[in-house]
Image (cartoon, helix red, strand yellow):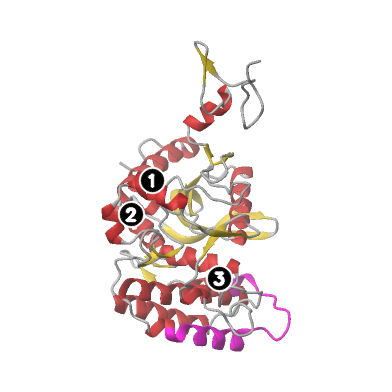
Amino acid sequence: MAEKMICPVCGEPTSSYMGNYRKDRLCKKHATEFKNGNIIQCDNCGKWHNVGTLCQCGRYTFTELPTEGFNKCVACGAETTGYAFCRKCFKKYDEDEMLEILNKADFKFISIADEKDYIDFDETPIERQRQEDGNCIVCGEEAPNGSLCRECYYEMLDYKDTFDKNAKIFELKDYYFNLRSNIYRMKNFDYVQSNCNKLMALAVLTKDLFGEQSLTDRVVTDIKDIIEKKSPKEKQTSSEYTKIQDARREEVNRTADGHYVKSYPESVIDDILYDLRIVHCYEKKVPISAEEQTITADWFIPVTDSRHGIYIEYWGMNTKEYLENKDRKRKSYKEHDIPLIEIEKDDYKDRRGLEDRLLSEINSLAKKYFHITDFKK
């Protein structure tokens, strides 16, 4: 009796053509999913799973080369600054060969609450140095793998990705000491903690780019001192004014038109608006209330007057709290039908593409909401 050909994913009959069955036994639906790059077969156990997720056996299958999360080359063991391969091996192998090496390498993955994963290495960089008490130096939560807990560690990585990798060493150091000084002036403790993770990111990036350890040698001590002095003695209730003032103290990146913004990607976006000669203001309150919380957009472009125009949000981080706030703000914009342009985390890297898209969307929204044709040529 012939073996019944069924899909290993769903159990439906295997797709066939002219009496010939697919060798992977996928049904028509999952064959299409595979063709579109949505599912992949695990090299370790042979089971199928969605791309970008862990397999049931605990393995992760890479479909593109990662650009962060590694501190040594998986091929030769040489030190790297986030990449899976050193420069020598990157030139030695083509992309398919590197993916094959990467997926055959033996990594240990640890899942965390927000469904992110990180790779556990024998050698760890400064940001994951083990502390004597085993607690995070920023928030006090358990930090079994270093000076930061998992949530703070990933916030630090998000911040690290926002800095200009072409910056000179003195610029990064100036940024560090200016930010450290400003943190002491902040009153909202949530802002203090978040910006301590930004300090850590600056120190790590400086070491990665220049091999300079003066900041990594002092950052843990600096953060501990900040947390000790700024930790509230009793439950804190911050006014909206206090939050706005603290947010202003994060703004240490100067743009071409004189604005001070919180990150390098924001400075790129602000400069694009300036180069396009589009009048804009940074951090404008949106005239709506979302769950009794004030919404502040990253940019506002006045169209008919100073109260009616187009808002821009740059979604620059991936922490659990940030993503929850992102969903809340998106929902409010949609419910109140407010014209919004959204810029995702890595969009700023393609400056020309972002410039073209902004110009197109601004004109489109000006026409849709305000009946103005060719608002900006």
Residue matched to label 2:
272
Badge 1 marks a residue whose secondary structure is helix
Q: Label 2 to label 3, Cα distance in Å?
A: 25 Å
In the rendered structure, are the residues bearing label 1 and label 3 in contact, judged by CB atoms less than 8 Å apart? no
Is residue 248 part of the magenta span, yes or no? no
Tell me where residue 91 sits by quadrant: bottom left
Residue 264 in the image, given as x and y percentages of width and height = 38, 64
Q: Main secondary structure of the magenta part?
A: helix
Left or right: residue 333 versus residue 371 is right
The answer to whether residue 133 is above or below residue 17 is below
Most foreground residue, 274 or 80: 80
User: Which residue is located at x 36 percent, y 80 percent?
Assistant: 173
Say what amino acid the circle numbered 2 marks: Ile
In the rendered structure, are the residues bearing label 2 and label 1 in contact, judged by CB atoms less than 8 Å apart? yes
> Mark 3 Cα within 10 Å, few/some/many (few <14, many 20+)?
few
Residue matched to label 3:
244
Say what amino acid the circle numbered 1 marks: Leu
The answer to whether residue 279 is above or below residue 145 is above
Which numbered marker is on residue 358? Answer: 1
Is residue 242 part of the magenta span, yes or no? yes
Instruction: Find the magenta span and give its range.
Output: 217-243
Q: Label 2 to label 1, Cα distance in Å?
A: 9 Å
